[in-house]
Amino acid sequence: MNTDCLAELSGVSKRFGKIVALDGVDLDVRRGELFALLGPNGAGKTTAISLLLGLRQPDAGSALLFGQSPQRVEARRQIGVMMQEVTLAAELRIRELIDLVASYYPDPLSPDEVLEMTDTTPLRDRPYGKLSAGQKRQAQFALAVCGRPRLLFLDEPTVGLDVQARELMWATLRQLVEEGSSIVLTTHYLEEAEALADRVAVLARGRMIASGTVSEIRGHVVRKRIACVTALTTEEVATWPDVQSVSRDGQRLNITVSNAETVVRRLLAADEDLEELEVLRAGLAEAFTELTQEVVA
Amino acid sequence: MNGTRVAETMMNATSLETGRAPGCRTVMPARRVFGAFFKEARYESVRMLRSPAFGIPFLSLPVALYLLFAVLLFGEALRSDPKGALFVFAGFDVLGVMGPGMFGFGVVVAMEREQGLLTLKRALPMPPAAYLLAKMAMATVFGVIVTATMIVAALTLGHLPLTAGQCFSVAAINILGALPFCAIGLFIGTRISAKAAPAITNVMYMAMIYLSGIMIPLPKTMQATAIIWPAYHLDHLMFRALGASSQGAATVHILVLASVTLVLTALSIRQLARVG
């Protein structure tokens, strides 16, 4: 096994009755990276994660965690998990919950270290059931890191967090990765993946439709947007080659193009007074939308 | 202070030290494994004792009902009827053992399955079996508390002349006697939704209380059917421990209770492994 590969799915397929949840999916999570798994609802993200956590077994292919079956407790002693839909014991205090989860690991942080690290010290003696939704997410994050995991699985970690808490969570995740931890992130917030991920994989209808760095995923979308202030009319520009659509917003012309360079040259040649020229590359969100729409269509 | 600076400040003090040798992250000394079992059991008991919806009815109801019937309503009559006094004591004691096991598993496991807690625990490196053993320990803790309060009530207000040996035997039977009811609850909790589990568990609980004859002597036509209920067998083991006459051999009662425990627990573990 490649020692840099901490978790992997190889040719994995999984069906639930007639529904194909995963169809020949390959995926690997490497040492020291934040890997974002994206996809629309029902794409197979949860199934992929549950196979890596040993909660389910693949029908075909293999799932490995640290080179072993994820069902082996020795493999899971190296991971931390934060799930989206989980209700912890409402009557237990946060320090008690950390103490309990830390007891599953050979070499955990102390509860006070975890509270300090995750900025949850003020929640220390509060029962879990009395916390707000955002505070519950922070407490769940504290449980995820308490065992000094080499690999963290985080499912929608910032749902319910206010802006400040989300910024803090992002900074903490970046710091963890800098220190050598690896993170598997599933999120609906594409700006979160764009800001944090070293690599992104996009699932749709149980298939891996794209994977690579954020730039590589963006590169799947050839389209670019040009905006400028010009006297040229929408009708005129719309007839040019490589122009897909044109709209006007006051003085600004917004042009969607398949080849930005040729259109920019022609714009500058056609209007010497052209101002405020901007060329915008597709963001991860646009790339995601285009990629998944192609599969769904 | 922006998020990056906050995180740097905090994490300078504490880090996950991911560079440590992998071995120290996977090998768990036996002492720590035992510690994990202990903490799971301890926190399961603590949370249930703190839960008013669970702790109050199951800790106070059996002794409150015992005091109502054996002291307030029929105290005079039972003083001249030692056999009847033992019947009432044993019945409410068995009632106290049944509740935490059946509801602690039947309702709580069903809820924890639906609320994702069981899934999270399966994903975490919790020692296998710690979840079930912790709940059994919780039911036993409740059983011990109920037994202790019942014995104190019986000795003081109920004027039941129990010897130290009988008290010890009753406590021992209660501790082990909780297990078949845990198994029944587990069987329900692993198969029924959280919405339906309280109703199903209640129906089973109430049916067993009355049809096993632990509270009200059954008419002759129904006595033969009482043996299908584990509560009947625990009640008769209790009679033996208290020196009262009982039906059936102790070994048969023990075998029935042990079989119910093993079969239902095995079926439930299989169900948990298959569908969570």
Image: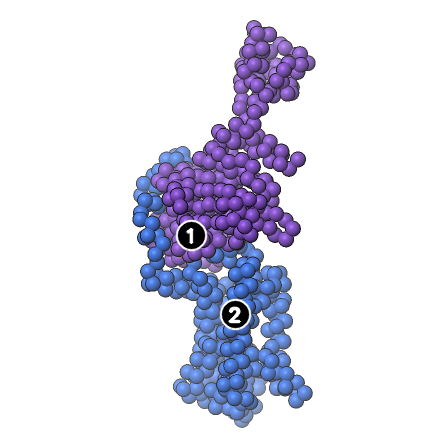
Chain colours: A purple, B blue
What chain is tagged by disc 2? B
Q: Is mark 1 on a helix, strand or loop?
A: loop
* Disc 2: which residue: B265
**x, y percentage for residue B215?**
59, 82
In the image, taking residue A115 as reference, residue B107 lies left or right, namely: right
Q: Which residue is drawn at 43% across and 83% down?
A: B169
Name the residue located 31 percent from the left edge and 48 percent from the top edge.
Answer: B21
Quadrant location of the N terminus of chain B in the rendered image: top left
Q: Nearer the viewer, residue A44 or B215?
A: A44
Give A113 or A247, whichever is nearer the viewer: A247
User: Hey, what amino acid is under mark 1?
Assistant: Gln
Residue bearing mark 1: A68
- The residue that appears at 42% across and 56% down in the rendered structure is A73
The image shows residue B97 at horizontal and vertical percentages of 51, 75
**Disc 1 crowd, CA 10 A, few/some/many (<14, 14-19, 20+):** some
Q: What residue type is labelled 2?
A: Thr
Secondary structure beneath dot 2 equals helix
- Residues at badges 2 and 1 in contact (C-beta under 8 Å)? no
Q: From where the camera sits, is residue A192 visible?
A: no
Q: How far apart are marks 2 and 1 (CA)?
A: 29 Å
**Above or below A40: residue B28:** below
Judged left or right of residue A171, residue A155 is: right
Q: Is residue A220 visible?
A: yes
2 vs 1, front mark:
1
Residue nearest the observer in this picture, A261 or B4: A261
Q: Mark 1 lies on which chain?
A: A
